[in-house]
Image: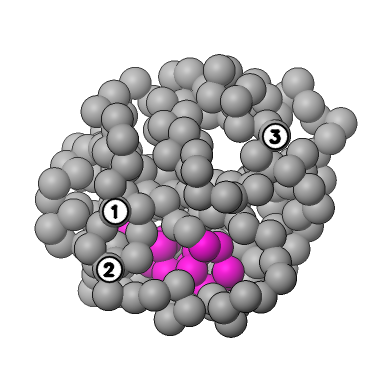
Amino acid sequence: MPADTAHSDRSGADRPGADPPGADRPVIAGLLLAAGGGRRLGGRPKALLPYRGRPLVENAVRVLWEAGCDPVHVVLGASAAEVRERADLAGCVVVENPDWAAGMGSSLGLGLRSLAGTGATAALVSLVDQPGIGARAVARVLAAYRSPTSLVAASYDGERGHPVLFGSARWSDIEETATGDQGARVHLREHAADLTLVECADIAEAFDIDTPPDLARLG
């Protein structure tokens, strides 16, 4: 399904964290996976969970902009029309995944395909339900990019987590192996020797909002 651009009144130079026009830097896209239906939350779409008075998806998008990702693509699924109506996704490319219930893998593959033609040499993949991971951690992972073959992940006390950066040379393989809820796990397992871990436990918390007790973490 083709991507379509959310209404935007921002130019790239006006986005938080954007470099000045013409700055010599690699194009690293932010890819936010925000399609989940919140099954263990009673069917409350995670993108619309309230966080600091606004939908949670807005926080995740802001983090990507502030860290320096550009462009930013957002994959929606559950209640996509309502998310579009209620959340400010200005400046983002919004992609709707009709097969979101099949698992994260389909959203990841669709999101990577949506980056074709953007000139991006890597994609920084983040999850909508991890508000404890801020722009400092994302920027730290971005800084480890070296080439289109880069494979980088944040780690927390030595354990791999999100966000994960995939150089563009890896996208086709990830798309082929990202099925069900596996996401990029197959690729990460098969290419473990290539993976650079970037410790982020000192500046971020990698908790997920999955169950009703987790909602207390949203404040």
Disc 1 marks which amino acid? Thr
Look at mark 3 in the image and give the residue it sits on. 169
Q: Is residue 38 above or below residue 21?
A: above
Location of residue 94 in the rendering, given as x and y in whole percent from the top left corner: 31, 49
Location of residue 60 in the rendering, given as x and y in whole percent from the top left corner: 42, 61
Q: CA distance from mark 2 to mark 1?
A: 8 Å
Q: CA distance from mark 3 to mark 1?
A: 25 Å
Q: Can the viewer see residue 35 in this picture?
A: yes
Q: Is residue 110 magenta?
A: no
Q: Is residue 147 left or right of residue 78?
A: right
Mark 2 closeness class: few <14, some 14–19, many ≥20 residues within 10 Å: few
Magenta-drawn segment: 57-70
Q: Residue at x 41, y 32 (%)?
A: 110
Q: Is residue 85 left or right of residue 195?
A: left
Residue 41 picture quarter? top left
Disc 2 marks which amino acid? Ser
Q: Is residue 166 left or right of residue 55?
A: right
Q: Is residue 179 above or below residue 116?
A: above
Look at mark 2 in the image and give the residue it sits on. 8
The colour scheme of the drawn protein is one colour
Which SS does the magenta portion mostly show? helix
Q: Can the viewer see residue 137 in this picture?
A: no
Look at mark 1 in the image and give the residue it sits on. 5
Mark 1 closeness class: few <14, some 14–19, many ≥20 residues within 10 Å: some
Residue 43 picture quarter? top left
Disc 3 marks which amino acid? Ala
